[in-house]
Amino acid sequence: MAAINKFKWLLTPLLIYICFIGIYIGISNFNDNNYLFLPIWDVKHYLDISEIGYRVYPCTPGVDGRLGDICGNPGWFPMWPLVVKLFRPLMGGSSQVTFITLTFLFTLLGFLLLFRLMETFYGYKAALLTLIALIFSPAGFYMLTGFPYALFLLLFMLYLFLLYSRPGLGRGVGLFIIAMAISLIYPTGILIAVVPLAWIIFNGENKFIPKSPKSWLKAVLYVFPFFLGILLLWIYFYFKFDDFFLQLHFQEKYNRTWAFPIYIMLKSLFKQPLLSPENIAILWYGLIFFVFYPFKIRRELWIPAIVLYLFSLTTGTTMSIYRHYLIIFPAYMLIGVSTRPLWLKLIYCLIGLILSLSILFPLFMKYRLI
């Protein structure tokens, strides 16, 4: 028993991980469906980037876009393909095998780090509920696909561990490198810059305290690498394709324009079926901020959670928002740490799982969930 208690920080997330993959692999096998492991939708673009790099060409009207639109793969970020390219020789040279293997490995490592962090700061029960909330979320199964969410979780947790560690040269270099890597995984990766910014501004206090010029300089140094990653990518696009803002120009065909998030949210809720995948995500994640208030996690965690929730809506569309919201990892922490009754937390998480198994995952297996 003493040995089990000593290693429960390892055994608990491992058992949760086994249950997680067992649910979705089991359902996939029962339905003789392997879409969970195929390079579908965006995964195909990540795979292509890892094998042949970035390609840009004019869209063919009526086939893949409108006249004047840009087609190819510059809309997808390079960090995940680069990691796959690095590990591919160790896995027989197959990109698909590498994508899936690394996804499952990074998910497990991310679970271990998430559990360890939550247990250290908030205790075993909060850590357990946080992981349950994550695996029971409506689109949690995307963690097991070739999308970059498992890598995002792993790097996000590594960043937090370093941020809360003892100052030193190694810590500073590590934070810089990880911040750049996060910003090159996914468009919303740059928003993780809010984490160190809030950490410095509030410094554990319940209110804003005016900072010295030295503190603001420190904040700039923490935030800078999140923007440097994007800047380097855009410089690369400039020299390769003669278009510094190629990524933004590429996105124009998806009709993403700046908009007021509450308007886009209400538009979706009233014009789409209530149980559409988009509205399910908007409601399940949005209600977390109301049901589990007041927030019991650190400010540098719940503030970015709200920023991440609103950001996708500011793009003027709810397309794929159910998987975009998957990376709001502090939202699961809010559930785990909340002082609300245990039965309420478990029911909330169970609702997420029911929505996943009855609506989102069946649509995914039918190749209808982008």
Image (cartoon, rainbow, N blue to C red):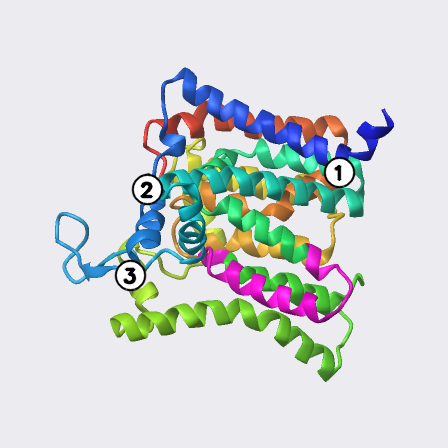
Q: Residue at x 63, y 35 (%)?
A: 133
First along the sequence among labels 2 and 3: 2
First along the sequence among labels 1 and 2: 2
Q: Tag 3's secondary structure? A: helix
Q: Is residue 215 above or below residue 24?
A: below
- CA distance for labels 3 and 1: 42 Å
Q: Is residue 56 above or below residue 353?
A: below
The residue furthest bottom is 213
Part of the protein shown in magenta: 161-188
Q: Residue at x 52, y 54 (%)?
A: 310
In the image shown, does 199 or 56 lie closer to the viewer? 56
Which amino acid type is marked by label 3?
Phe
Q: Is residue 291 above or below residue 25?
A: below
Which amino acid type is marked by label 1?
Ala
Q: Mark 3 packing: few (<14 Cα in 10 Å), some, or many (20+)? A: some
Between circles 2 and 3, the one closer to the viewer is 2
Residue 176 is covered by the magenta coloring:
yes
Residue at which label 3 appears = 250
The dot on residue 50 is: none
Number of dots carrying numbers: 3
First along the sequence among labels 3 and 1: 1
- CA distance for labels 2 and 3: 16 Å
Q: Is residue 68 left or right of residue 232?
A: left
Residue at which label 1 appears = 126
Q: Residue at x 76, y 76 (%)?
A: 210
The dot on residue 41 is: 2
Q: Tag 1's secondary structure? A: helix
**Image marks 3 and 1: residues in contact by CB distance under 8 Å:** no
